[in-house]
Amino acid sequence: MDNDQLRAIAAEEVGMLSKVLPEEIAQAASNCSVHFEDKPEDDFEDPEILGCFEGSSLIDDPDPSAPARIRLFVENLWDYAGEDEQDFRDEVGTTYLHELGHYLGWDEDEIAERGLE
């Protein structure tokens, strides 16, 4: 599957998840952009990372120079899913929700408590 297809599937999955989020979380999530990228840049700490949250979380003071965004790395997600489309969809959803948890201000323990790891 090529990267354009992977990005389209990932965007579809995030779109479907966004429709079933609790209203309060969906409203907050609408203020955090999602970017579908092939792979992280070469200088990224973990080249196999599936996704990341960057910017100010909802509990931080907003920093206009660092807008909130979630980055999902479709090639890494595809590899992690063993090149299986359903597993890819599932992992996109899990990774998106995990990073959304960071945007909401939850730390790793709070994310795990909510089953978003």
Image: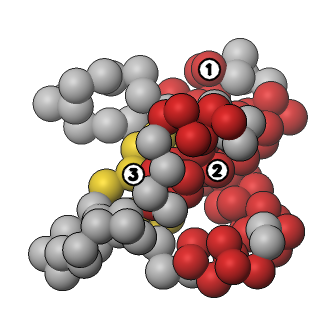
The CA distance from mark 2 to mark 3 is 11 Å
Q: Is residue 96 above or below residue 112?
A: below
The quadrant holding residue 111 is top right
The answer to whether the residue labelled 2 contacts the one labelled 1, judged by CB atoms less than 8 Å apart, is no
Direction from residue 84 to residue 63 in the image, left or right: left
Q: Residues within 10 Å of mark 3 (few under 14, many from 20)?
A: many
Quarter of the image containing the C terminus?
top right
Q: Is residue 3 visible?
A: no
User: Which numbered disc covers residue 97?
Assistant: 2
User: Which numbered disc covers residue 80?
Assistant: 1
Name the amino acid type tagged 1. Answer: Tyr
User: Which numbered disc covers residue 30?
Assistant: none
Give the tally of numbered discs: 3
The quadrant holding residue 88 is top right
Direction from residue 111 to residue 83 in the image, left or right: right
Q: Earlier in the sequence, mark 3 or mark 1?
A: 3
User: Which numbered disc covers residue 53?
Assistant: 3
Name the amino acid type tagged 2. Answer: Leu
Q: Is residue 46 above or below residue 13?
A: above
| Residue 86 point in image, percent of width and height | 86, 34
For this rendering, which residue is in front, 18 or 73? 18
Name the amino acid type tagged 3. Answer: Phe
- Residue displayed at 69% across by 60% down: 14
Q: Earlier in the sequence, mark 2 or mark 1?
A: 1
The answer to whether the residue labelled 2 contacts the one labelled 3, judged by CB atoms less than 8 Å apart, is no
| Residue 44 point in image, percent of width and height | 22, 31
